Amino acid sequence: MKRWWEALLGLLWVQVCWVKAVKVEQSPSVLNLQEGANCTLRCNFSATVKTLQWFQQNPGGSLIRLFFIASGMKQNERLSSTMNSKERYSTLHITASQLEDAATYLCAV
Ligand SMILES: *[C@@H]1O[C@H](CO)[C@@H](O)[C@H](O)[C@H]1NC(C)=O
Ligand SMILES: *[C@@H]1O[C@H](CO)[C@@H](O)[C@H](O)[C@H]1NC(C)=O
């Protein structure tokens, strides 16, 4: 019997990126999840930014824009993102993670 619930989701790699001289810190850097688990990735930034984007890069290399967010919360099926410009951070939340979520996640300002 295929014990799908024990399958490891693989790796969610996140990276640190610097764009337009704003320093962005992202955590955690590597995440191992069980299928079905929830997780939250977070980006802190060093300066006030108006908008932020979250991207997903699949093992094949293609870059998909998940969210373009200016404030508050946005949701798209199992993914949601929050932006708090005042406290200079944004989160990406994955609910009930699936194998297809194994990817690199980036935030860019
Ligand atoms: C972001 O800032 C919070 C609050 O200061 C801190 O707890 C967290 O570790 C920071 N995360 C990153 C990725 O720098
Ligand atoms: C994940 O989050 C959803 C929605 O908040 C919740 O219903 C579910 O119980 C959570 N799952 C786990 C494994 O914590």
Image: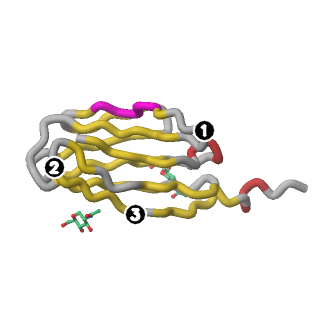
Callout 3 environment at 10 Å: few (<14), some (14 to 19), or many (20+)? some
Secondary structure under tag 2 reads strand
Q: Amino acid at mark 3?
A: Pro
Q: Is residue 97 magenta?
A: no
Magenta stretch, overall SS: strand
Q: Indicate which disc, 2 or 1, sits on the residue closer to the N terminus.
A: 2
Query: Which label lies toward us, 1 or 3?
Result: 1
Q: Secondary structure at mark 3?
A: loop
Q: Name the residue at 54% across, 47% down.
A: 103
Q: Does residue 67 belong to the magenta stretch?
A: yes
Q: Is disc 1 placed on a helix, strand or loop?
A: loop
Please, what is the three-letter code of the amino acid marked with disc 2? Val
Q: Is residue 99 left or right of residue 57?
A: right
In the rendered image, which quarter contains the C terminus? Answer: top left
CB-based contact (under 8 Å), mark 2 and mark 1? no
x, y percent for residue 7: 72, 58
Spot occupied by residue 8 in the image (x, y as percentages of width and height): 67, 60
Instruction: Of the two numbered discs 1 and 3 on the same chain, state the one appearing first in sequence.
Output: 3
Question: How far is disc 2 from disc 1 in space, using C-alphas?
Answer: 28 Å
Q: Which residue is labeled 1 in the image? A: 60
Instruction: Read off the residue under disc 2.
Output: 22
Q: Which residues are drawn in magenta?
A: 64-68
Whether residue 7 sits left or right of residue 29 in the image: it is right
Q: Which residue is mark 3?
A: 28
**Observer-nearest of 57 and 8:** 57
> Which percent across, then down, holds residue 30?
48, 63
